[in-house]
Amino acid sequence: MGTETTFEEFEVGQRFETGGRTATEADIRMFVGATGSTDRIHVDHDYAEAHPLVDGVVCHGTLTLAITDGLLADEIAQEAALAMNYGHDGVRYLGPVYPGDTLTATAEVTETREKEGGWGVVVTDVEVTNGDGETVLVETHRFLVATADHPALSA
Protein backbone atom coordinates (compact mmCIF):
# COMPACT_ATOMS: atom_id res chain seq x y z
CA MET A 1 0.00 0.00 0.00
CA GLY A 2 1.26 3.41 -0.90
CA THR A 3 0.65 6.89 0.47
CA GLU A 4 -2.49 7.27 -1.64
CA THR A 5 -4.29 4.19 -0.36
CA THR A 6 -8.08 4.51 -0.43
CA PHE A 7 -10.80 2.60 1.38
CA GLU A 8 -11.32 0.18 -1.51
CA GLU A 9 -7.76 -1.15 -1.20
CA PHE A 10 -8.25 -2.53 2.33
CA GLU A 11 -9.21 -6.21 2.44
CA VAL A 12 -10.58 -8.42 5.20
CA GLY A 13 -7.71 -10.62 6.43
CA GLN A 14 -5.05 -8.05 5.57
CA ARG A 15 -2.45 -7.78 8.34
CA PHE A 16 -0.23 -4.94 9.47
CA GLU A 17 2.77 -5.16 11.79
CA THR A 18 4.09 -1.97 13.29
CA GLY A 19 7.57 -0.93 14.21
CA GLY A 20 8.43 -0.69 17.88
CA ARG A 21 8.08 2.13 20.38
CA THR A 22 9.81 2.03 23.77
CA ALA A 23 7.82 3.38 26.71
CA THR A 24 9.79 5.62 29.10
CA GLU A 25 9.40 7.22 32.52
CA ALA A 26 9.41 10.56 30.68
CA ASP A 27 6.30 9.35 28.81
CA ILE A 28 4.63 8.65 32.15
CA ARG A 29 5.58 12.07 33.54
CA MET A 30 4.29 13.85 30.44
CA PHE A 31 1.08 11.80 30.57
CA VAL A 32 0.61 12.76 34.23
CA GLY A 33 1.12 16.40 33.25
CA ALA A 34 -1.38 16.16 30.42
CA THR A 35 -4.06 14.24 32.34
CA GLY A 36 -3.49 14.94 36.02
CA SER A 37 -3.65 11.18 36.69
CA THR A 38 -1.24 10.67 39.60
CA ASP A 39 -2.22 7.20 40.82
CA ARG A 40 0.70 5.91 42.88
CA ILE A 41 1.18 2.80 40.75
CA HIS A 42 2.43 5.11 37.98
CA VAL A 43 4.56 7.56 39.99
CA ASP A 44 5.61 6.07 43.34
CA HIS A 45 8.42 3.54 42.95
CA ASP A 46 8.24 2.21 46.52
CA TYR A 47 4.47 1.74 46.35
CA ALA A 48 4.62 0.08 42.91
CA GLU A 49 7.44 -2.29 43.90
CA ALA A 50 5.40 -3.45 46.91
CA HIS A 51 2.21 -3.89 44.84
CA PRO A 52 1.22 -7.55 44.38
CA LEU A 53 0.37 -7.23 40.67
CA VAL A 54 3.37 -5.33 39.28
CA ASP A 55 7.14 -5.17 39.70
CA GLY A 56 7.54 -1.39 39.68
CA VAL A 57 5.93 1.72 38.23
CA VAL A 58 3.86 1.01 35.14
CA CYS A 59 2.46 3.02 32.28
CA HIS A 60 -1.16 4.09 32.51
CA GLY A 61 -3.38 1.81 30.46
CA THR A 62 -4.56 4.79 28.47
CA LEU A 63 -0.94 5.79 27.83
CA THR A 64 -0.39 2.30 26.42
CA LEU A 65 -3.48 2.79 24.27
CA ALA A 66 -2.14 6.17 23.11
CA ILE A 67 1.19 4.59 22.14
CA THR A 68 -0.78 1.92 20.27
CA ASP A 69 -2.73 4.62 18.48
CA GLY A 70 0.53 6.20 17.36
CA LEU A 71 1.91 2.88 16.13
CA LEU A 72 -1.26 2.24 14.11
CA ALA A 73 -1.35 5.77 12.73
CA ASP A 74 2.21 5.38 11.47
CA GLU A 75 1.53 1.96 9.93
CA ILE A 76 -2.00 2.30 8.56
CA ALA A 77 -3.52 5.80 8.63
CA GLN A 78 -0.42 7.63 7.42
CA GLU A 79 -0.37 5.42 4.30
CA ALA A 80 -3.93 6.36 3.41
CA ALA A 81 -4.80 9.23 1.10
CA LEU A 82 -7.13 10.62 3.77
CA ALA A 83 -7.90 8.90 7.08
CA MET A 84 -8.50 9.41 10.77
CA ASN A 85 -9.11 7.48 13.96
CA TYR A 86 -12.78 6.46 14.25
CA GLY A 87 -12.69 4.77 17.63
CA HIS A 88 -11.49 2.05 19.97
CA ASP A 89 -13.76 -0.79 21.11
CA GLY A 90 -13.24 -3.62 23.56
CA VAL A 91 -9.95 -2.28 24.92
CA ARG A 92 -8.42 -4.67 27.45
CA TYR A 93 -5.20 -4.15 29.37
CA LEU A 94 -3.84 -7.68 29.75
CA GLY A 95 -0.43 -7.01 31.25
CA PRO A 96 1.64 -4.24 32.75
CA VAL A 97 3.81 -2.02 30.58
CA TYR A 98 7.00 -0.90 32.30
CA PRO A 99 9.36 1.92 31.34
CA GLY A 100 11.84 0.32 28.97
CA ASP A 101 9.30 -2.05 27.38
CA THR A 102 9.23 -1.86 23.61
CA LEU A 103 5.71 -2.22 22.26
CA THR A 104 4.70 -3.47 18.82
CA ALA A 105 1.23 -3.97 17.39
CA THR A 106 -0.32 -6.35 14.93
CA ALA A 107 -3.61 -5.37 13.31
CA GLU A 108 -5.82 -7.54 11.12
CA VAL A 109 -8.63 -6.10 9.05
CA THR A 110 -11.84 -7.86 10.13
CA GLU A 111 -14.43 -5.71 8.39
CA THR A 112 -14.77 -2.97 5.80
CA ARG A 113 -17.97 -1.09 5.15
CA GLU A 114 -18.83 1.95 3.10
CA LYS A 115 -20.20 5.00 4.82
CA GLU A 116 -21.92 8.04 3.33
CA GLY A 117 -20.07 11.07 2.03
CA GLY A 118 -17.13 9.32 0.37
CA TRP A 119 -15.91 7.46 3.45
CA GLY A 120 -15.43 3.87 4.48
CA VAL A 121 -14.80 2.27 7.85
CA VAL A 122 -11.91 -0.16 8.23
CA VAL A 123 -12.18 -2.29 11.37
CA THR A 124 -9.08 -4.02 12.76
CA ASP A 125 -8.45 -6.41 15.62
CA VAL A 126 -5.28 -5.28 17.36
CA GLU A 127 -2.83 -7.11 19.62
CA VAL A 128 0.00 -5.22 21.34
CA THR A 129 2.99 -7.09 22.70
CA ASN A 130 6.01 -6.13 24.78
CA GLY A 131 9.62 -7.02 23.97
CA ASP A 132 9.16 -10.44 25.61
CA GLY A 133 6.29 -11.27 23.24
CA GLU A 134 3.68 -11.01 26.01
CA THR A 135 0.32 -9.55 24.99
CA VAL A 136 -0.31 -6.38 27.00
CA LEU A 137 -3.31 -4.89 25.19
CA VAL A 138 -6.02 -5.98 22.77
CA GLU A 139 -8.67 -3.84 21.10
CA THR A 140 -10.81 -3.33 18.05
CA HIS A 141 -9.66 -0.20 16.25
CA ARG A 142 -11.73 1.62 13.64
CA PHE A 143 -10.35 3.90 10.93
CA LEU A 144 -12.35 6.27 8.78
CA VAL A 145 -10.78 6.18 5.30
CA ALA A 146 -11.67 8.15 2.18
CA THR A 147 -13.03 6.27 -0.81
CA ALA A 148 -11.47 6.75 -4.24
CA ASP A 149 -14.31 9.10 -5.22
CA HIS A 150 -14.09 11.28 -2.07
CA PRO A 151 -14.50 14.94 -3.13
CA ALA A 152 -11.31 16.01 -1.31
CA LEU A 153 -9.21 13.57 -3.34
CA SER A 154 -10.41 14.79 -6.73
CA ALA A 155 -9.55 18.43 -6.08
Image (cartoon, helix red, strand yellow):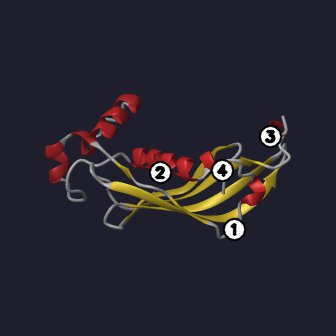
Instruction: Say if mark 1 contacts mark 4, CB within 8 Å.
Output: no
Label 4 SS: strand
Label 3 SS: helix
Instruction: Say if mark 2 contacts mark 4, CB within 8 Å.
Output: no
Specify whether 57 is left or right of 122: left
Q: What residue is shown with label 4?
A: 143
Of the pair 139 and 133, the residue shown nearer to us: 133
Mark closest to the chain's N terminus, 2 or 4: 2
Which residue corresponds to the image point at 71% horizontal and 42% vertical from the top-left? 82
Mark closest to the chain's N terminus, 3 or 2: 2
Which residue corresponds to the image point at 66% horizontal and 53% vertical from the top-left? 2
Which residue corresponds to the image point at 30% horizontal and 54% vertical from the top-left? 101
Q: Amino acid at mark 4?
A: Phe
Mark closest to the chain's N terminus, 1 or 2: 1
Q: What residue is shown with label 3?
A: 153
Mark closest to the chain's N terminus, 4 or 3: 4
